[in-house]
Image (cartoon, rainbow, N blue to C red):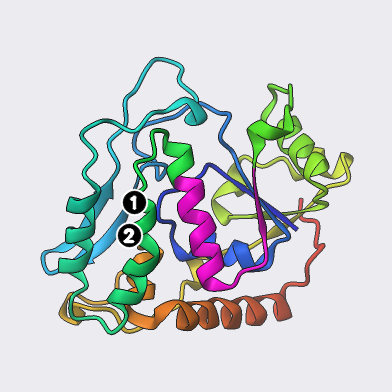
Amino acid sequence: MIYIEQPPFAPWLGFCEALFACDTVALYDDVPYTDGGYQNRNRIKTAHGVRWLTVPVTRAPGQLIRDTPIAASFDADSMLRTIRLAYARTPHIDEALHVLRPVLGARHSWLVDLNIDLLTQIRAALGAPARLLLTSELNIDEDDRTQRLAAICTAAGGKVLWAGSGTRTYLDTTALAEHGVSVQWNAYAERHPDYVQTWGRQGFVPSLSVIDTVCSLGWAGTAALLRTGLAAYLQQHAPNEATA
């Protein structure tokens, strides 16, 4: 299976599950960068509620994700202090920072380089098998969205697309099937697992950065959570299931 998503910063558990579910995770970096997404930010839980961790970037009209530079104002030490303060009471904060600190402090100039470095380290820490690739490396010349997705799948050797429920409104499964690509819906948001979070009086907050989970459970515990949930889901929803 293959999963395709714009390269996220410090991703949520749904992305991390794809690292276990799929042979390939294709990072869609040759599309325009847009504000308000998860390419340069994600959410953590603090004593004062949920807050964004944001990597500032420099924008230009029509700029692609792969061509988006990190702004000079990015302060990695400040971000690390924010994470440390938010999760100081958790049992695995040092384990999380051991992976995060070298990447955030590497002085990357480009957002895509920071993200793929962080995703590579997260994948390794989780022990996930999927390979990561950038769609810009596939040299696909196709403007139609569905045709482009099909071409990415074909170029990467993926015959089953692992797709989020949010894509049901626009993903043309019939057109993909004509290219030999079936769709496996993952419905992760609907089955997001609970775990013991810090600042428990605020209640459980789903869909945070994997940083939140790792600080509570550690890398091995987070991997076990993902593997268990994936296995249970696939028992009920067989792979290679084409859905129109």
Viewer-nearest residue: 170 or 200? 200
Q: Is residue 186 left or right of residue 152?
A: left
Question: Looking at numbered disc 1 in the image, what kind of residue is underneath it?
Answer: Leu
User: From the viewer's perspective, is residue 110 above or below residue 190?
Assistant: above
In percent of width and height, residue 90 lies at: 25, 81
- On screen, residue 17 versus residue 38, left or right, reads right
Q: Secondary structure at mark 1?
A: helix
| Residue at (25, 31) in percent of width and height | 72
x, y (%) of residue 44? 27, 62
Q: CA distance from mark 1 to mark 2?
A: 5 Å
**Residue situated in front as seen by the camera: 135 or 168:** 135
Q: Residues within 10 Å of mark 1 (few under 14, many from 20)?
A: many
Residue 74: x and y, percent? 24, 39
Reply yes or no: does residue 131 show up in magenta. yes
Displayed quadrant of residue 46: bottom left
The residue lying at 46 percent from left, 83 percent from top is: 221
Q: Are marks 1 and 2 in contact (CB under 8 Å)?
A: yes
* In the image: residue 6, left or right of residue 77: right
- Residue of label 2: 101
Check if residue 119 falls in the magenta segment: yes
Quadrant, the N terminus: bottom right
* Mark 2 secondary-structure assignment: helix
Give residue 8's mark. none
Magenta part of the protein: which range?
115-133
